[in-house]
Image: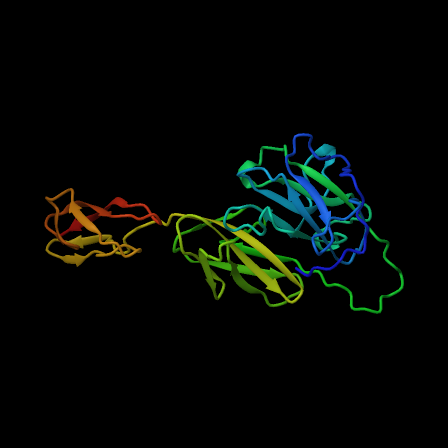
Amino acid sequence: MNKRNMAAVLVAGLIAIGLAPSAQAQSKVTFTAATGAPLASQTLTGLNPGGDVVTLTLGSFPTGKGLYVYQGVQGAMGARPTQINQSSEQWVTTAMGGTAKPTDLISVKVDNGHAWGADCAHQVCGIAIEFDHASTADHSEDQFFPITFAAQSTTPAATTPVTSVTITAQIDGKNLSATVPGSLPYETPKYVVVTTSDGSKPTLTISADPSGKTFCNVKDNLITALAGTNYCNLEITTTNGKADFPFALTPGVQFVRTAPKSIKIGQAIALSAKTNFGESATYKVATNSTCKVSGSKITGKKAGTCSVSVKAPGTANYPALKGSISFEVSK
């Protein structure tokens, strides 16, 4: 995100329209210059409608919690915004995968709303703050700070206008969210379909956490979790824009790949000696009158249904396997 000084003067007093800062809110918002120096006045007026950056700090951050900070259209009757500038969203948290830490200087990219279906000249747009996905029902941190933009000149500007780009991403046909982490199972590659509004080519990378670690990797649009717990952040950039999509990592599902549909009496086949995660599979025949097992080799003995139990140890990244395989033994 390009940082530059806002053209507007930001005035004191956290004045909100409708969705006012909650009396119970712990966090204190201070708007700053791009250098991080607090500004004397705190009202967001006269911003560049083609694109601007609001910078702020958060004091008295709620312990053990996370906050979303974003540009949106003020909700009706004090409700949270439903029209949101997704490219502006910042997830402020100490957890892995956040886009900013509570101690960071937080930058929120704002514009007149035309790129995301709003019209900030006729709607009340502003900076919204709320608890993250872990505390969605708790409204005690809801805050809203209105923004007004400078009037656009009817005379064409001499400089090249700012280009806004919308970046969307999908996995398995479902849109990814910039605020609510998607679920990504351990060592289960998922293909990310990326669409950009201007047709520009996207670049996919994984952001490191505050300690410099990454718990996922991405290659050729395939994102893979490298752990069964933690978070990671997928960063998608183009020439004219950037979007972040967080993921919560979950344990993988362990299974054996080879299982017969049926075998004949006297026929011997080999089952998978290893699970998909490389653990040694142990088989035991439950119906020993129809089949027998030796190691991972199973042989049909008598016509009927053969049921074989299978077990394999687990790790912190995936649970132990305990299941069964059933198939028919025929003449």
- Does residue 10 appear to the left or right of 81 in the view shown? right
Q: Position of residue 301 (x, y in %)?
A: 10, 50
- Does residue 180 appear to the left or right of 141 in the view shown? left
Q: Residue furthest top?
A: 23
167 vs 15: above or below? below
Q: Residue at x 77, y 55 (%)?
A: 6
Q: Residue at x 45, y 60 (%)?
A: 217
Q: Residue at x 81, y 69 (%)?
A: 159
Q: Position of residue 49 (x, y in %)?
A: 79, 55
Q: Residue at x 71, y 35 (%)?
A: 21
Number of on-image labels: 0
Which quadrant would the N terminus be assigned to in this image?
bottom right
Q: Position of residue 276 (x, y in %)?
A: 30, 56
- Does residue 29 appear to the left or right of 136 in the view shown? right
**Residue in front for this viewpoint, 87 or 61:** 61
**Coloured how?**
rainbow
**Residue in front for this viewpoint, 7 or 186:** 7
Q: Position of residue 56 (x, y in %)?
A: 69, 48
**Residue in front for this viewpoint, 268 or 256:** 256
Q: Residue furthest right?
A: 155
Which of the 4 quarters of the picture holds residue 3? bottom right
